[in-house]
Image (tube, helix red, strand yellow):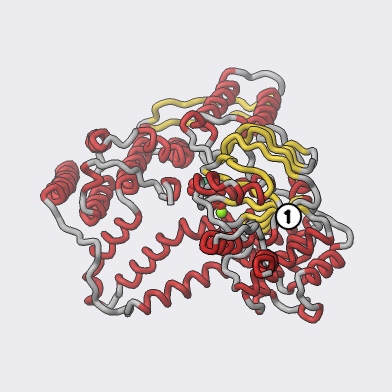
Amino acid sequence: MAINLSQVNFSYEPVKKRKTNHFVLKDIDLKIEGKDEFIAIVGHTGSGKSTLAQILNALLVCNSGVVDIFGKVVSRKKKVKLKNIRQQIGLVFQFPEYQLFEETILKDVMFGPKNFKMANREELAKKALETVGISPDMFEESPFALSGGQMRRVAIAGILASNPNVLIFDEPTVGLDPLGKKELLDLLKKLNEEEHKSIIIITHDMEVVSSACKRVIVLDQGIKVFDGEKDELFKNDELIKAHSLDYPNSIKILKEIKEKLNIDINIYQYTIEDAFLELKRVLGDSHE
Amino acid sequence: MNDKMVFGQYYPINSWVHRLDPRAKLLSVLILMISVFLIDSIYILLGFLGILFIIVISTRIPIGKFINSFKMMSFVLVLTFIIQILFRKDGDLLITFNFQLTYFSLMIIVVTLLLWLLVSKYIKYFKLLIFLIVLGGLMALQYYTNIWGHIVSYHIDIYSRGLVMGSYVVLRLLGVLVISSLLTFSTKPTELNNGLDRLLSPLKKIGIKISILSMMISIALRFIPTLSLEADKILKAQASRGADFKEGSLKQRIGQIVALIVPMFIISYKRAYDLADAMEARGYIPDNDRTSIYVLKYRFSDVLTLLFDFLVLGLTIFLKVAYAI
Ligand SMILES: Nc1ncnc2c1ncn2[C@@H]1O[C@H](COP(=O)(O)OP(=O)(O)O)[C@@H](O)[C@H]1O
Ligand SMILES: [Mg+2]
């Protein structure tokens, strides 16, 4: 088990006032594998998603409970090598393009591997840039001359270059156009399928959840209220209602069609293609 | 934005000092400061501090806040007092201390100072007080012992003027500290800025445009919390790429700081351009006359306060002249 949280509580206020503290995370239990996972963390603004991501990266330390990351227990009392944790868990913040600072793209991407004292840092950086689709003739250019979408990809390469096993993305699709969004999701799928990385996406967007993720975690006011397959979540109408979540478009449309036409159809399709195939199957059947 | 984002020393309660017009408060501070420096009798100075103390009590700002601001200045206070005592050589000679520095006392002094260097970072409270006690102990050692190889004798003379001037300096600094703390505890930075703007606006007649300056200050004040949030984000983003702002050689650390500063510059520029566009879109023209959303009005309590200030100033000037004769 790569990540193992149990009974984790966290508050931004100083520990001294613990009795009256407002806890941002409450009694979180969470297990995440070091490979092949594709998890979405959803929940409303202020539900603690970004805070959880920072706990997983050891940027924040919990007030009580156990945070075990790749066998290292992060706690306020005992110092552990945080660098190892941060190398193995890559965290891509919201609007990561603001973290660029070097003169050239290649140098910026090498910042992580250099800090982690990795041997083949240049190769790692070049490979990461290639993965995100930045062509080699741009390596020596300034990162500030790029377009917004390209900057974001370079910033993501800056995390990939350290070759982490688990990648956390905090609202990665915010501010991207539909094409940029699709490209980014394709990139994440590729990392998941070909390199067997565990991917964790924090998002509001149910389209992202439905088209890419396997497992969904729902946070509501710092409490983990759901953790399971996405199918299980979307079939649980009460849960969706209780935490005022949304359905993905494909399910919404199929649901509407099912009610209007009163036909027997499996509405739980997660991509437009699947929805189309299902419709064709059902309608084709009934026409015969 | 929550409470923590209110920066500075402002203490949010609703006392009569809080409710005063910022212009009245700024003028009061100016007048009272002048008074403090004009007073040259220690009894009047003590009386003045007594009045300040009553004002402080009446605001119900915790005394601890004031003590905290003394703490920051305590080193300076103690140092000026000691310097006055050591170097003032007029008035009556009160007492002479004879000290003997011997190899024995020298050894103990060196050992104690080394120990202090090691231990001092674990002392949380009353650090200065403990240091002074240790220092006093070392001086007492040189005063009472004369064994093991005499090196040099020296003496410290304490004169009455030294004692008096030392007390003066310390009491005056205390007065200045209380007055300025009272202002910053009871007035938000934005209020201060508005008050200054309005007080200095007559300078426009001689061609100094205070309104531009105060606009700059209020924008800067507005952006401190925003930019500190951004800085926190960048810091975390670089830390998750393995940056370590605490370890490493100087050269490495400078490299890491660049990773913080460059993004901060870019964000600040971007924000500045956005703000400039937004202001222009709403028709902001720097030199134009404009009314302010914060209308300042002198009320009865403000007039009373200012009257009181002038009374204090008049009294100190009168006493100064009377004493001089
Ligand atoms: N740096 C901070 N200091 C104090 N409170 C914070 C800080 N960051 C977030 N919070 C608070 O913690 C709660 C959870 O925030 P966050 O984890 O950012 O939620 P989400 O990412 O789900 O929108 C919110 O109530 C927010 O106000
Ligand atoms: Mg967030």
Q: Is residue B148 left or right of residue B215?
A: right
Relative image position of residue A85 (x, y in whole percent):
76, 46
Q: Is residue A199 visible?
A: yes
In the picture, which quadrant includes the C terminus of chain B?
A: top left
Name which residue lies at 16% across and 42% down.
Answer: B319
- Vertical order, A9 against A204 (above or below): above
Query: Is residue B155 at least partly visible in the picture?
Result: no
Q: Is residue A190 left or right of residue B108?
A: right
The vertical placement of B194 against A182, above or below, is above
Q: Is residue A237 left or right of residue B314?
A: right
Between B267 and B151, the one nearer to me in the picture: B267
In the picture of the structure, the residue carrying the numbered disc 1 is: A199
Where does residue B144 sit, x and y in percent of width and height? Answer: 58, 18
Q: Residue furthest bottom?
A: A137
Q: Dividing the picture into quarters, in which one does residue A139 lie? A: bottom right
* Three-letter amino acid code of the residue under disc 1: Ile
Q: Image check: B171 left or right of A17?
A: left
Q: Residue furthest left?
A: B300
Q: Nearer the viewer, residue B7 or B161?
A: B7
Residue that lies at the very extreme toward the front in this rendered image: A288
Circle 1: element type: strand
Quarter-wise, where is residue B216 in the image? bottom left
Disc 1 residue crowd, few under 14, some 14–19, many 20+, Cα 10 Å: many
